[in-house]
Structure formats: structure tokens, C-alpha cells
């Protein structure tokens, strides 16, 4: 009897599934299953139509962090269609005659809506965009500022090296006459471009960074004195933070997160600790993390503790003879169990740290306070100020 019932259930399931098998043009009967572009949410094969539906409303509300700085704080989760990529923090710095943007967010639409909110505070253009690192939740709004405001984009050279921008119909890509693109491409299909609905990502392309630097550099843009500090390989291949000495504010992006566990998928523990030491060596009252809502003098405390414990405990277990296969059972970092994304990200951080710390050398750690801060860039200062002004 059970066998007969099982066969009947399989037959019913097959009958219900028949309209979907091999069908790429489903007639959707339930409008609530559609996104704003008319795309059937449950089936990725439905072709997205770029011109339909209103732009995604990010419902952005700027929060003033210091005298010159306002920020938009993202969701404490991974990028999803539901948050439309709004899961990192981006900021505006108020200059004398123009805004300076720090990390432009996950899309062209996000950037345009962020500017609309900031224009209500001060009706000024955006003169410059400064980017912290290459992860695409932080800079896919760049082309809005480039196209609309003619802004200069400052950022890591790794963005230009690792991401290709728009490719145009008829443009050549090889030695043969037929080696031309047959359609327009917005550029590399990054994680965010793949993940988001069309009404959130439309209009987004990948412009190149206009200016990148080899070392820490001082800038003055629209009357604002800034130090663009290179910390190198930390959370990503090339990380920078922005220090505003007159405002006593530091914008550090993903080398600091609070309220959630970091993702160290592209990073290294030693680099993270060095970045935190470089931040600690500066005089600040306000710190804006890449993810998280704490911006006071305690903003970096969780990150400092996390990477300190991660390094010490992994190395202790290595000394005890624990092999990589068992390290995530031995090092659990229970102090962070109540933080967002702990179960998703922390085990991976532990495992990758084991691989890195097998080659650890104490000389890899940098004591910035003992050296009086970062490298001396005063020789570049005047030139860079004139260039940026």
C-alpha cells in the first residue's frame, strides 16, 4: 500500500511540475511572485527587462557622525535581493564647496538616491569619490558620480587590475577582423551585479579608478584635509582608510566591523592586526566601520579582540599538534557567538587563518606607535594637495 501511495505522490508531483520543466517563458498567474521589473522571482531563467518597473527604493536616511561626516548604514547581513546590496556603510564628507564621497555603495541607483538625500543637507556637487578596497558592495555606485558629477575617483589600483569595465558593440578584443563584441556589456559580472534585481542594479557599470597611489598620501579637497592611509593586504588585496585630522574622524571600511563577524575570505590575520594598529596610532573620536553601527571610541574594540583571539588561539592549537582538519572544532571564538553572521563566517576565518599562520613570523607585525605613525609622505603633500584641490 505504501509503495502505491509513493508512486501516486510522485505522479502528482510530476504533473504539478510539468509546466516548469524546460519552460523558459512561464505565464505567471500570481502577480505577487513578480519583482518590480516583472521578473518571476523563483526562476532565474526569466529574461530581465531593463526598462520596466520603478527603480528600487533604498529608503536612505543619512546619519550625522561628526561635524563634517554623514553616513548611510547598511544591513547586518550578506548581500541579497531583499536588501538590494545595501549591506555596507558609505559616507559623505562636507567640503567648503563640494561633497566628497567615501565608498559609493552597491549600485548606480543607490548612489543617486544617496546624493538626493545629501543634497537636502547641502546643495553641492560631488567633487571626489574615495574608495577603500575592491569588494563590490563598496564602489559600484562610482559611475553615477563619474557620469553625473564628473567626479574624480580615487582608489586602489587593484580595482583597475582585477575588474574590467564596459565593453561596447563593435569594439575589438582580438587580432582577427571578426573579434568584436556583438552587444553592449556593462563590464564584469561581479557578485553584486549577479545577485540583485534589475531595478536595483540597472545603470551600473564599472568605471576605472582615476587616481591611485603607491603609499599613504595627504590630500586637500574642497578645503578638507585628509590622509588616505594604505594598510595593504588586510581585509582584501589592497586596503586603505581615510583619516580626517581636523574632524578627528576615521573612515576605515572593512578593516573594522562591529556587531557582526568579519569575512576574511580574501584577507589575512596579520594584515588585519597591522591595519588596526595603524588606526590606533591616529587621534580620533569617531570611527565609521565598513559594517556595523558603533562609531564612538569603542568602535574598533570588537575587531581588535576578534583578530587577537583568532591569531593567538589558532597558533596555540597548532603548537598542540592540532591539524587543519580539526581546527574549526578546537577554535570556536565563543565570545562572538551572539554576533551576526557568526555561524556563516567564523569557521571559514579560523580555517584560513590556520593556513596563513603556519608561516607566521613575529616581524610581520608592525608597531605604528613605536614608529611615530605611518610612512612620511610630506614630500608628496604639496603636490597632491594642488592636484586634488
Image (tube, helix red, strand yellow):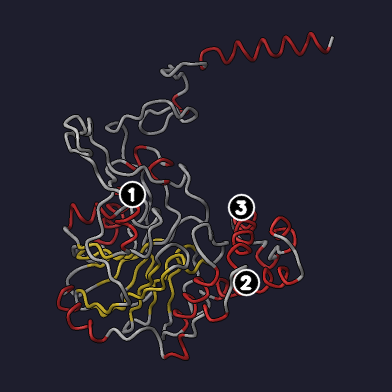
Q: Nearer the viewer, residue 53 or 222?
A: 222
Return the mark for residue 107.
1
Q: Is residue 377 above or below residue 164?
A: below
- Check the image and name the residue furthest to the front: 175
Identify the residue shown where x is 47% and y is 48%.
79
Identify the residue shown where x is 39% and y is 53%.
136
- Residue 140 in picture, x, y percent from top left: 33, 52
The residues bearing labels 3 and 1 have C-alpha atoms spaced at a distance of 25 Å
- Under tag 1, what secondary structure? loop
- Under tag 3, what secondary structure? helix
Judge left or right: residue 70 versus residue 365: left
- Residue that badge 3 annotates: 344
The residues bearing labels 3 and 2 have C-alpha atoms spaced at a distance of 19 Å
Judge left or right: residue 322 versus residue 75: right
Nearer to us: label 3 or label 2:
2
Judge left or right: residue 7 versus residue 353: right
- Under tag 2, what secondary structure? helix
Label whose residue precedes the other's in the sequence (3 or 2): 2
- Residue 59 in picture, x, y percent from top left: 38, 51
Identify the residue shown where x is 25% and y is 55%.
208
Q: Is residue 119 above or below residue 50?
A: below
- Residue that badge 2 annotates: 311
Return the mark for residue 206.
none
- Check the image and name the residue furthest to the right: 1
Q: Are marks 2 and 1 in contact (CB under 8 Å)?
A: no
Q: Residues within 10 Å of mark 2 (few under 14, many from 20)?
A: some
Identify the residue shown where x is 47% and y is 82%.
280
Label whose residue precedes the other's in the sequence (3 or 1): 1
Q: Are marks 3 and 2 in contact (CB under 8 Å)?
A: no
- Residue 88 in picture, x, y percent from top left: 43, 58
Amino acid at each position: 500500500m505504501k509503495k502505491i501511495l509513493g508512486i501516486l505522490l510522485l505522479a502528482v508531483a510530476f504533473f504539478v511540475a510539468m509546466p516548469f520543466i524546460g519552460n523558459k517563458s512561464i505565464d505567471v498567474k500570481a502577480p505577487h511572485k513578480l519583482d518590480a521589473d516583472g521578473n518571476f522571482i523563483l526562476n532565474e531563467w526569466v529574461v530581465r527587462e531593463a526598462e520596466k518597473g520603478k527603480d528600487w527604493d533604498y529608503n536612505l536616511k543619512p546619519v550625522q557622525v561628526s561635524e563634517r561626516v554623514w553616513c548611510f548604514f547598511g544591513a547586518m547581513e550578506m548581500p541579497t535581493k531583499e536588501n538590494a546590496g545595501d549591506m555596507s556603510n558609505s559616507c559623505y564628507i562636507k567640503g567648503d564647496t563640494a561633497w566628497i564621497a567615501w565608498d559609493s555603495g552597491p549600485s548606480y541607483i543607490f548612489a543617486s538616491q544617496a546624493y538626493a538625500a545629501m543634497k537636502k543637507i547641502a546643495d553641492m556637487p560631488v567633487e571626489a569619490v574615495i574608495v577603500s578596497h575592491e569588494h563590490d558592495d563598496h564602489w559600484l555606485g562610482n559611475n553615477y558620480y563619474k557620469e553625473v558629477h564628473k567626479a574624480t575617483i580615487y582608489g586602489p589600483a587593484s580595482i583597475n587590475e582585477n575588474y574590467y569595465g564596459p565593453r561596447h558593440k563593435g569594439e575589438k578584443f582580438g587580432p582577427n577582423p571578426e573579434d568584436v563584441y556583438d552587444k553592449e556589456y556593462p563590464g564584469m559580472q561581479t557578485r553584486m551585479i549577479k545577485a540583485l534585481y534589475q531595478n536595483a542594479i540597472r545603470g551600473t557599470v564599472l568605471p576605472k579608478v582615476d587616481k591611485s597611489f603607491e603609499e599613504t598620501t595627504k590630500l586637500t579637497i574642497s578645503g578638507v584635509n585628509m590622509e588616505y592611509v594604505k594598510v595593504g593586504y588586510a581585509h582584501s588585496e589592497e586596503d586603505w582608510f581615510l583619516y580626517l585630522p581636523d574632524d578627528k574622524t576615521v573612515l576605515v571600511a572593512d578593516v573594522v566591523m562591529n556587531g557582526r563577524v568579519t569575512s576574511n575570505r580574501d584577507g589575512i590575520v596579520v594584515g588585519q592586526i597591522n591595519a588596526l594598529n595603524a588606526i590606533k596610532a591616529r587621534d580620533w573620536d569617531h570611527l565609521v566601520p565598513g559594517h556595523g553601527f558603533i562609531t564612538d571610541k569603542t568602535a574598533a574594540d570588537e575587531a581588535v579582540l576578534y583578530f587577537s583571539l583568532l591569531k593567538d588561539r589558532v597558533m596555540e592549537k597548532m603548537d598542540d599538534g592540532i591539524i587543519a582538519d580539526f581546527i574549526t572544532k578546537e577554535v570556536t571564538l565563543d565570545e562572538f557567538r551572539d554576533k551576526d553572521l557568526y555561524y556563516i563566517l567564523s569557521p571559514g576565518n579560523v580555517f584560513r587563518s590556520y593556513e596563513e599562520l603556519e608561516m607566521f613570523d613575529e616581524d610581520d607585525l608592525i608597531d605604528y606607535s613605536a614608529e611615530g605613525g605611518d610612512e612620511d609622505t610630506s614630500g608628496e603633500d604639496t603636490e597632491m594637495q594642488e592636484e586634488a584641490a
